Image: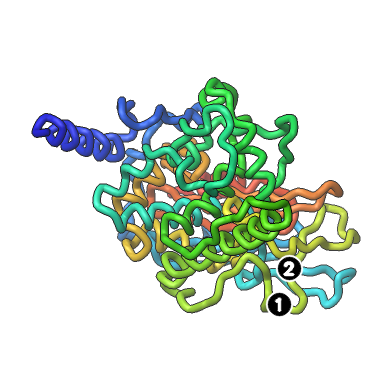
Amino acid sequence: MKTKKIASVFLIIALMLGVMACNKEGTLMPKKIEHSDTSVQTLETQSKINQASLGVSDFSALGDILANQLKNTIGFAAVISYNGSFKTTRSGGQCRQSQDAPARAMSMFDKYSAASISKTITAAALMKFCSTKPDGIWLMLTPIWSYLPSHWTLGPNIKTITFYELLTHTSGFRYNVTGVGNGDDYQTLKALIAKGINLADKTTGSYSTRYNNRNFDLLRLIIPKLANYNIVTVNTSSPLSLLLGEYTQAQQCADGYKDYCRKTIFEKLGSCAGQVMDCVNTTDTYPGLYYQYPNLNDKGIPVGDLTLVAGSQGWVLTTFQMDDFFRTLQYTETIVPKFYSNYMKTQLTGYDIKGFTSDGVGYYWKNGIYTTNSGAGYRSLIIGFDDGIQMSIMANSPINLQNAAIAAHQIWYP
């Protein structure tokens, strides 16, 4: 028994060292993914900027440079923060065009469904749960299967999938699997779990091949169970009771997920605390729309209610709310302790890429993408730099926001 306790202590120490020194491969945490040629580098660069000398004009210049990088869109809004404090905003173009009257200029207060930035929110919610438990980081190594709906069939190798693998897209789930749709809804998730995975798919293929929305969609069902929300047990005695039970369970899980995110994240924000966040825009009579650029006469497209497919997507936010979440998460401990926000960065749990600018400044980012068959689309981005600069950007037509943000920082860098 004594040996077992000693081993547990060493195991905890090893986990913590693995987080604090993310460039060293640990034997206990799953192998980190190389998302790009630069992603295996760590965020250890020391900023060359004399932070005390930065003034209003510096942030204004960065905002102007960023706006120039974003000009080829129907509409954009960007917020720049520094060391956790709001500094400046830029916007341009239109939130709604004249063919979708009433036309409206775009600002940082226009609401859009933030797409995959929702994954960072979901990851933060899970980290919040971990932080409420002694040695809660152990949940990362825990298999997820016992937290899935109890009546679901577990396919091959499902019992091997851990929380860490969901958060890092190393679960082995794939798109275009025979007999499984590519949706994010309850029934598709059920079919995905019943189909199972190939163990080799956990480690083979590019990041874009391994990336799968359903990793975070499953957390929409799991987080409410972890947090002890009242979720109905499905009666499988007849087709009708199964149908009604699953309909109720899907709604209860989605509502529980939203409630947990609101209470543990959105109500903890700085400037935006108290504002109601949802997975549908219920406040704007004429909401912001998505467009194809440069087809200026196309009708705009709304997204609608994403409550039942949330987790990987869905949260409706303004650019300012998105920025408030990002800086509160990474520069305060009001959402999670620093250990967990650092863990998210170093292990890329809720973020996509980490790397370096051409000037040697480290960065990490998460983007969001909606694209329709017509070519209309939406993009979102949160990106943090090692010098304390954070950018939160939304564009209501297709554009590579991460390239624009990195380019702006490189042009501006003193």
Residue at horizontal 30 percent and vertical 39 percent from the top: 19
Q: Residue furthest front?
A: 237
| Labelled disc at residue 288 | 2
The residue type indicated by label 2 comes to Gly
Tell me which corner region of the image, top left, top right, bottom left or bottom right, holds residue 297: bottom right
Can the viewer see residue 225? yes
In the rendered image, the residue lying farthest to the left is 2
Q: Residue 91 occupies which quadrant of the picture?
A: bottom right
How packed is label 2: few (under 14 Cα within 10 Å), some, or many (20 or more)? many
Q: Is residue 312 above or below residue 75?
A: above
Do tag 2 and tag 1 residues touch (Cβ < 8 Å)?
A: yes
Q: The N terminus lies in which quarter of the figure?
A: top left
Residue 192: x and y in percent read 64, 38
The residue that disc 1 covers is: 284
Q: Secondary structure at mark 1?
A: loop
Residue 221: percent from the left, percent from the top? 54, 53
> In the displayed structure, does residue 124 sit left or right of residue 110?
left
Under mark 1, the amino acid is: Asp
